[in-house]
Each structure stands twice: as C-alpha cells, then as structure tokens.
Image (cartoon, coloured by chain):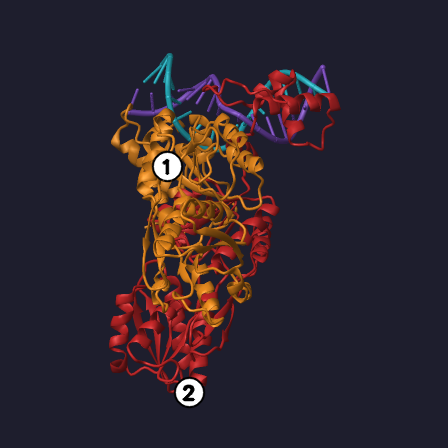
Chain colours: A red, B orange, C purple, D cyan
Amino acid sequence: MRKPTEQSAERSVPTSADVARLAGVSRATVSYVLNNAAAVRISEPTRRRVREAAEELGYVPHAAARSLRAGHSRMVLLPTAHVPIGPLYSQFFNELQWSLRRLDYTVVQYGSLGLEADEAARAWAELRPVAVVSLGQVQLTPQGVEILKRSGAKAVITLGSQRVEGAHALVMDQGRVGRVATEHLVEVGRRRIGVVVPEEPGLEMFAEPRLEGARQAVAGTGATVVALPLRYEEDSANELAGRWRALGLDAVFAYNDEYAMLLMRALQDAGISVPEETAVVGSDDLLLGRLLRPRLSTVQIDMVIGRHLAELVDGAVRDPESVPEARDLLASRVVRRESS
Amino acid sequence: MRKPTEQSAERSVPTSADVARLAGVSRATVSYVLNNAAAVRISEPTRRRVREAAEELGYVPHAAARSLRAGHSRMVLLPTAHVPIGPLYSQFFNELQWSLRRLDYTVVQYGSLGLEADEAARAWAELRPVAVVSLGQVQLTPQGVEILKRSGAKAVITLGSQRVEGAHALVMDQGRVGRVATEHLVEVGRRRIGVVVPEEPGLEMFAEPRLEGARQAVAGTGATVVALPLRYEEDSANELAGRWRALGLDAVFAYNDEYAMLLMRALQDAGISVPEETAVVGSDDLLLGRLLRPRLSTVQIDMVIGRHLAELVDGAVRDPESVPEARDLLASRVVRRESS
DNA sequence: TTGAAAGCGCTACCAG
DNA sequence: CTGGTAGCGCTTTCAA
C-alpha cells in the first residue's frame, strides 16, 4: 500500500509537530491519540487521521524528550563487563529481560568494561535509569550507589556476594557453592582438599567467596583446604597436575565444570586416578560434564528465577522500602556422579 | 573530606541550575566549565567554585536533556536476544564495546528477546541511537532499517549472514565455516556427510548458512550431505546415534564443538568408532575439545577484531557513504586433530 | 568574563 | 472534543 518513497534522502526526523501538521490537528491531539490518553475523548475520524499521518511519516516518539518531560524514565540498567559465560547466566539474563519488559520497563545493558567504579556509576547515572541491577561484574561502591540514587534511581540492586552500603543486596551466596562441594568431599572421607581459584580476570567475585565457603566447610573437621591458582589453559593444568603428589591432595573442588574437566584430564594424563586417588567436583552441572568418564560430580546451582527478580525490581521501584534487605538466591546442591 | 550528608532523603535530583545557584553563577557558566568549552574563557576561581558546587551536590548531567538539545546522541545500540554463547562472542563483544567507548560512544545493549522485527526497530528508534549494530540475533527487515534511518541513525550495520536492504552489511560468512569443514571431510575421503542442525532457537542464523556451505562443498564431488536436527540433550544425541548406521554416514560436521562432544560421546556409546567408522568435526576450537579422546577436529574461526568493527562504525557515522558494502569478516580454517 | 533567553520534542494542564 | 502553552534540563548565541 505504501508507495516506496524514493526520498530516503537526509530528511530531518519527523516530530509530533510534523504529524500534527500533516493530520491538520494540534500537537496535543497527536499526543493524546498516540498514547491512548484515557482522560480525553478524541473523535474516531481524528484518531485515524493522526495515526495515518504518523504511519506515513514513519514517526517514532523521542524517548529522551518524553522522559525529560515526564521527569522519570522506565529504564532498567544492567551494567555488564565480561559477558558471563555459561548457560546458567544466559538463561537468567534472558528471563530477567523478558520479565522486565513485560512490566513495561526498557532494559538496557551498559557495557562498562574498563570503567572504574565511580566513573561507571556516573556514566550510568547520566541515563537516569529508574533502577540499576548489578550482577557484580562491575564493583559498586557506596559512593557509586549514592550517585545513582541522587540521580533519581529508585532502586540499586546488587546480585554479587559482596554487600554494598545503600544498595539493596540480593545476595547470591557464592560461598554456599564452595561450602556444599567441600562438605560433600569431607563426607566421603577426603581430608586434603584443593580449591581451584581461576586466574582469569572478572572471576574473583565468584572464586573468592567459593574458596571462603570451602574454608568454612572444613572448620572443625580436621580436613584442610588449599587454594590452587589455575589458568584456563592446558599448560597451566599440566603444571598443576605435575606437582599434584607433592601437594598431597586427595580431592579438589575445581571452581566449575569447565575447570574441572580441564584439571581432570591433566590429572589423568599425569597418572593420577579419579576418583580413587583424587576426587573431583565441579559446579554448574554442565551437560558436557556428564559425558566424561568418570562422569563429573558437580554442584547444581538453582539460579534465581528471572521473573522473580523482575518483580523484586518492580517492587523496589514502586516502593523502595518494600524490598527485604538480604535474600539468598542460590540454592545449591551436590550431584554426585563418578568423579567423587 | 566530604562530610557525610545525612540527608539521603528523597531530595530532587540536582540540575545545572542548582549548581549555578550554589556557585553563584549562571547556568551558562556552569555548562561552559563542566564541558571545558574552549570558545570561552572563564576565570580560574569561577571554575573552581563551579566544580566544587557540582561535586558537593553530586551533580550528574542529564544525558537525555543534553542530546535533546544537541539534536543527536552518541549512542550505539546493540540489539541482543539470546545471549550469544561461547568465548568467541564474548571476546568480540567486549572488544567492540571497549573500542567504541574509546571513540567516545555510549554502548548500549538492548534486550530484544521476543520482539518482532519492526516492533523491535521502533523500540530501538525511540532511543535515537546514532548507530545500530545488529549481530543477527534479531532479524532486521528493510522496513526496520528504514525506520531507524528515519529516526536519525546514521549507520545500521548487520553482521548476520543475511543481507538486509538499506543496511550496511558486514557479512560474517557462516557458510564458510560449513564449507571448510565439509571440504576437509571430503578430502580425507568421506562421502556421506551429516551436518548437525541445532534445534535450539536463535541458532538458525548460524546453522542454516553452515548447512548451505556444506552443500556447496560437496557439489560436484560425488559426496552427499544430510541435515541432522539435534537438540543439545543427551536423549536427542542418543536417539540420533541409535539410527546412525541406518543413515549410512561416515562423517559429521557437528555445528560446533559442544554439539560435537555431545554427539561423539553418543556415537561411542553406541559402539561406533571415531574416526574409523565416522569422522567428527566441530567448530570454535574450544579448549574442552582438545581434552577428549580422540581429540576433536574443529574449525577455528577468526572473529573480526572488535576494534576494526568499531572503526567501521565510526566511519559510517561520520560519513555513511564511506563504508564498503560487503566485507567478509570470518576467516575459518580446519584444525585437524584425531577425530577426523 | 558572565548572564539572559531561546529552543530541542514531548505531555499535561486549562480554555475554548 | 480540540488547541494553546508552559516547562522538563541542557547548550549556545547574543548582549552586556
């Protein structure tokens, strides 16, 4: 029906005034029609003319102008740095975004790699988001939270394991992952337990609490924990496997399934039998771990449901006081297979 | 130095007028100082007063107001739907974002899962991005491109393998991945070649061109290609392995390393020897693939450098005509290990 | 060297 | 039922 307008030429972008002019009405009327304003009754013919004019011009409202006028936006900002790997996060992320959009928020991820904490907070604040949900990839400081709140953010929610003053903390207790894994190893009779600490940047926020959780798990049991720095490379794993017997370990919680697979292979190549000589436990319950021989024991993590979090965000936006301060969002349990 | 202002209370967000008032100057002066306006000389004492006032109030400029006034933004919008899987994308993404920020763009990922093509384009257009870089997760239509351009986007760049009218296409030739894998299999003497097509949503845009590339590779060689739908689940793989001999295949390009690992295990469990009876090739050159026995052959993909793409985006923004229309951004080559 | 004021696109109040 | 208009926060021209 639309005739191909040959004038893709650099025409300026249409505004509601253009629509009004074309439809022969005022800008106010255009606004009413396009926003389905309930408080005002516009005749059907007028509505049609307005809609047609908007369509004709390819009119799209200007979000900045709108939220400037409104005095608030419905943008939820998710800072990201290192794109988190693994299906766990992917699914969580998708769910969260989808659910927030259903609640009529605009979800925007802000790539913040390489920004310092407060610098980042300021950059986010410029966009005047109504809420910021930090997955813990970019460290937030109390000052950063203050900046965001001062700039109008109703809710600043951190999902990391570290609590930040002023922010709503929805604690994902990573420590728990390390704890249950280690408890399991102690239960099956292991005493000298290694805990892999990845050397890759961006993982400290998970790795440190997991190590700490492992330490808690052995407290009073007589078992001991040894931190094992490891890069996600064959060389690094082989090097570690090479001095394994010197370390005198009989079990290892390998951070996650991927590191576990890497390390397990290196151990086997070094002639160390799994699980007889050394038990191995990963986490995340990846499909690939089930394919190994021996099958990899793992910690299954129930990530918080995205929808649930979306509702929490919405609640916090509507009434910042309404959100419970801390809340554990990670249920973790060991799935014992053959490697432990 | 700053005394802890106890009044975190719901004070309205500070504007440049507040800063001006506190500093005892006009709003204009504030703007000059904070933007380091070169055209105007402001006395050093005044500058200090302004800066201190801004600091004191925790003033952060309002991006919407600014770009409304300026008539343009420096926002680059990256639509995302399914978070891309694998380290390949992660690294690319991070590089791109980092490089664009260095060029003074604000990079924003817009979660678009579940939005229809034109609906999505309209949503993006509301933000008036200066450029849109689509990684092909959300299908763009010519109309969508038109909407974006009309709303002021200087550059609409697609990285998918499908070309979209009106957009700058930076083709990532996924077909090539399938082609080199299949050529390799033909070279080593295989004739009946299966090509895994994942059934998971969001992967069609990679899977289809790869299958097509495989078809091209066998043309005229006497070898044949069979599409093999597969879900990323053990059951699905076992089911496929169960009818493997009936299919009469002597090789398979398994989409990527993860699917390859899954399928290879299922084949081995079904008593089909790799590579003797069936050769297996994946892609992405994951570390985990090297840990298998037999070691997994794979297609190594050199993803375009993020920095390179960032410069292309910048070029397109400055002069939309300057960008070469199509350009191949995927160099792929087979890494032969033991599974083929 | 600084200030006054216009205006970006939009919505909501108030008149007609 | 529709139109005029003020004003959101910011930058920039023009005057002082």
**Quadrant of the rendered structure where residue A126 is?**
top left
- Secondary structure at numbered mark 1: loop
Residue appearing at x 51%, y 63% in the figure? B244
Q: Does the residue at mark 2 contact the one at mark 1 (Cβ under 8 Å)?
A: no
Could you tell me which chain the residue with mark 1 belongs to?
B
Along the viewing direction, whichever of A243 and B2 lies nearer the viewer: A243
- Secondary structure at numbered mark 2: loop
Question: Against A165, is A180 above or below?
Answer: below
Q: Residue furthest front?
A: B222
- In whole angstroms, how far apart are the C-alphas of marks 2 and 1? 56 Å
Marking on residue B105 = 1
Label 2 Cα crowd, 10 Å radius (few <14 / some 14-19 / many 20+): few
Residue appearing at x 47%, y 38% in the figure? B162
Residue A154 at x, y = what percent? 53, 48
Label 1 Cα crowd, 10 Å radius (few <14 / some 14-19 / many 20+): many
Marker count (numbered): 2
Say what amino acid the circle numbered 1 marks: Tyr
Residue appearing at x 59%, y 55% in the figure? A307
Task: Please identify the quadrant where the C terminus of chain B is shown.
Answer: bottom left
Along the viewing direction, whichever of A253 and B211 lies nearer the viewer: B211
Residue underneath mark 2: A189
Question: Against A259, is B325 above or below?
Answer: above
Say what amino acid the circle numbered 2 marks: Gly
Q: Can residue A285 be seen in this view?
A: no
Question: Against B140, is A210 above or below?
Answer: below
Marking on residue B187 = none
